[in-house]
Amino acid sequence: MNDILTLISGYVWGWPMMILLLGTHLLLTFRLKFPQRHIFKAIRLSVTRDPNSTGDVSQFAALATSLAATIGNGNIVGVATAVALGGPGAVFWCWITGVFGIATKYGEGLLAVKYRRKMPNGKMLGGPMYALEDGLGWKWLAVLFCIFTAIASFGIGDMTQSNAIASLFVNSMPENSDPQNVMLIRCLVGGLVSLFAGIVILGGVKGVSRVCSYLVPVMASFYILGCIYILCINGEYVWPALKLIVVSAFNPAAAGGGFVGGTLIMTARYGMARGLFSNESGLGSAPIVAAAAQTRNPVRQALVSSTGTFWDTVIICAVSGIVLVSSMLAYPEVSSIIDRPDFTGMMLTESAFGHIPFIGRPLLYFGIFTFAFSTILGWGYYGERAMEYLGGQKFIILYRVIFVSFIFVGAVLELNVVWNLADITNALMAIPNLIALIGLSGIIVKETRYYLWENRLDEEAEDN
């Protein structure tokens, strides 16, 4: 199965997909006159309450929920896997995807609020499916997006995350442990995570956003502090690591001994794939929860949404990549892990964090556990909204049962199978969303000109 999925993943993440993804990032960046320059204004808006505006949750709660879904194991295990398979240059392509992806995340947030619908019960629904249907008139593509979203939620949303949590406990067991005991631990962990996630998911968007609002700042802060400590003890290798990342992004063979020296397309492919997996810019997931935010107009929420990619990839993924590459330069035993037949990205990250005395591995385990659990919560909400669009409220309970069940399945599956499946479903989900962004780029520019360029950010939209 893994061989088949690897083959399919290679096709869907070929040059056409990379051109479509990066091309959309560049198109919106230039048409919107580099919205990245407004990032500090966007950060200020993200922590400013706007309670009198229409919406289900605060802007910060919506951002926290989307960050909970994006700041996951793509930032830890995913970056390590990209470095192992694509070389240190993959970190550069992952970072570039994030920098230009800020514009795409901005466009997604704008369209989510512009085309959101207020239901009879007062709940706000939105996302790429409504932009595709109401903006472009392509309901068939909206249906495809929702189908791909529901499928993707089982890959990126729960199986990869529960697998990472279970692997934490398995990796702490003795090397020669009985396989039956290993499987028993995986089953127990999968069952417990399924139980706790199910309890939170039943609370709906307000329950999920409430948990994420507390969890996200804590988990991100602890992880970044750990990374800063490693960079301090790796001080003399940080600058060489940065140079190696940039040079090998265009000449993978320059990575030299201990590193993978693949082709440029392999380096770019793994970097962009992990970048999209991490920040989800262009994927179409974050705008689903952005549509529920309390905001005066589409541009305010667009700015807030864009900060998600900044924090996730431009900061956290970049720091993770530099930590890994500098550790591989500083410690031969870290770089040698890639050659192990049982290699996983988790092993590489764990070895790097092991150089923090006493608390290194516990800190990493806490980060992975909280990152993974919060991602499950966020993607549970995304999948629900996709199923609600496809069949109404009657499908939500059934979806929740299946989603929680797949948390257990992911805990016992082979990791490589899960990651390849997630890559494939991400690409299939991204294509309809990128089409919507390109097709409605004129609307995005028009709204941006009115509210942002002409200084009307505090104005309430007539149809809000």
Image (cartoon, helix red, strand yellow):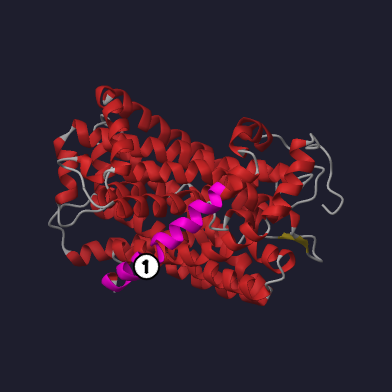
Amino acid residing under circle 1: Tyr
Q: Residues within 10 Å of mark 1 (few under 14, many from 20)?
A: few
Whole-percent x, y for residue 111 in the image: 69, 55
Residue under numbered circle 1: 11
Q: In this image, 320 relative to 438: left or right? A: left
Bounds of the magenta segment: 3-26
Whole-percent x, y for residue 160 in the image: 39, 59
Q: Could you tell me which secondary element the residue under label 1 belongs to?
A: helix
303 is higher (above) or lower (below) than 197: above
Looking at the image, the residue that sits furthest to the right is: 462
Dominant SS of magenta comes to helix
Could you tell me which residue is drawn at 60 percent across and 43 percent down?
30
Residue placed most toward the observer, 255 or 71: 255
Q: Is residue 90 visible?
A: yes
Whole-percent x, y for residue 56 in the image: 73, 52
Whole-percent x, y for residue 285 in the image: 57, 57
